[in-house]
């Protein structure tokens, strides 16, 4: 069966709680994007076990839609791409260098997956991304235009052009953290294919130097707060900017937190804090 045949739009929309329209318009794009971002957690349990997760539609349905699991950027945005295509959107793939926490724009390889979504009747396509595991991630898609600030799901973003030596315009997505604008990732509009993401996924999911293969890294966004588990450190960030942190004591506590706070069913035999 093809990926299109394995994808179940009704089951996906039920999983994210979307009961709105199914037209290929801005309202549907924004609504489905926000519902996905607030329903499906970010997690790296497969890479933590030493294997890259499958990006096949049937496996994504079993894990993220029918199972109590999340995924990382390739899984989230592949699932979102399938959903948007089923809703009638034309969707293209993009890739970015993550600059958040990096010393320079060029310090990291271009491995983060996002989506370019043209919308009928709209002058510019949208940037959609439900797979960036950070408190500054997009909760709603933004038009691919510079010089304008956008608000979605209570978060503010903008796209800023960067100077560089390449022939294509380089854009940086920035998030406002309550005090300043913080770079998230940089990208051009060069299209990327499913085969490219398979290579990225294998590298990020199996390389022993990848942060995703070395410690648990989980994120969950809700209307009330953003939760992050990085190793044993649990961080809660509230909409007013208040941040609280605590260290989890042991494996048993980590499993309870992951199940109760992130809504993730930890697989049998999986070790979180090793």
Image (cartoon, grey):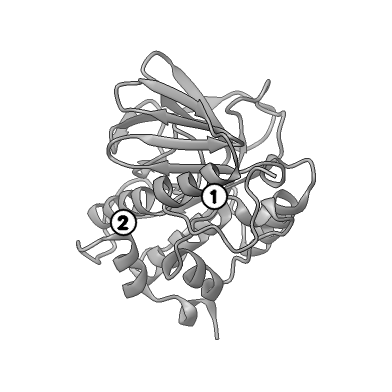
Residue in the foreground of this view, choosing between 86 and 211: 211
Residue appearing at x 33%, y 68% in the figure:
87
Residue appearing at x 62%, y 47% in the figure:
272
- Residue at the far top: name it: 179
Q: Position of residue 95 (x, y in %)?
A: 60, 46
Asked if residue 129 is positioned above or below residue 248 in the image, the reply reads below
Q: Which mark is residue 43?
A: 1
Q: Which residue is mark 2?
A: 32
Asked if residue 32 is positioned above or below residue 189 in the image, the reply reads below
Determine the secondary structure under disc 2: helix
* Distance Cα–Cα, label 2 vs label 1: 20 Å
Residue in the foreground of this view, choosing between 29 and 210: 210
Badge 2, how many Cα within 10 Å: few under 14, some, many 20+?
A: many
In the rendered structure, the answer to whether residue 242 lies left or right of residue 197 reads left
Quarter occupied by the C terminus: top right
Res. 169 visible in picture = no
Residue 238 lies in quadrant: top left
In front: label 2 or label 1: 1
Residue appearing at x 68%, y 63% in the figure:
195
Res. 244 visible in picture = yes
């Amino acid at each position: 069966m093809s990926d299109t045949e394995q994808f179940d739009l009704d089951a996906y929309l039920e999983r994210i709680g979307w009961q709105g329209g199914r037209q290929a318009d801005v309202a549907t794009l924004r609504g489905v994007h926000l519902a996905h971002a607030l329903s499906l957690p970010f997690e790296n349990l497969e890479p933590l076990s030493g294997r890259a997760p499958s990006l096949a539609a049937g496996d994504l349905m079993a894990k993220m839609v029918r199972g109590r699991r999340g995924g990382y950027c390739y899984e989230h945005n592949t699932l979102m791409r399938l959903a948007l295509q089923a809703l009638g959107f034309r969707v293209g793939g993009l890739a970015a260098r993550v600059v958040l926490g990096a010393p320079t724009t060029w310090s990291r390889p271009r491995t983060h997956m996002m989506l370019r979504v043209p919308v009928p009747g709209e002058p510019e396509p949208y940037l959609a991304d439900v797979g960036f595991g950070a408190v500054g991630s997009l909760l709603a898609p933004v038009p691919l235009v510079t010089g304008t600030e956008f608000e979605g799901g209570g978060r503010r973003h903008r796209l800023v052009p960067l100077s560089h030596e390449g022939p294509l315009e380089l854009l940086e997505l920035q998030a406002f953290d309550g005090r300043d604008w913080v770079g998230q990732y940089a990208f051009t509009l060069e299209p990327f294919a499913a085969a490219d993401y398979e290579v990225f996924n294998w590298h990020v999911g199996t390389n022993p130097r990848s942060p995703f293969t070395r410690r648990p890294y989980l994120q969950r966004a809700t209307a009330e707060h953003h939760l992050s588990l990085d190793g044993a450190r649990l961080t809660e960030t509230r909409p007013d900017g208040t941040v609280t942190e605590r260290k989890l004591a042991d494996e048993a506590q980590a499993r309870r937190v992951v199940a109760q706070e992130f809504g993730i069913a930890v697989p049998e035999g999986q070790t979180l804090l090793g």
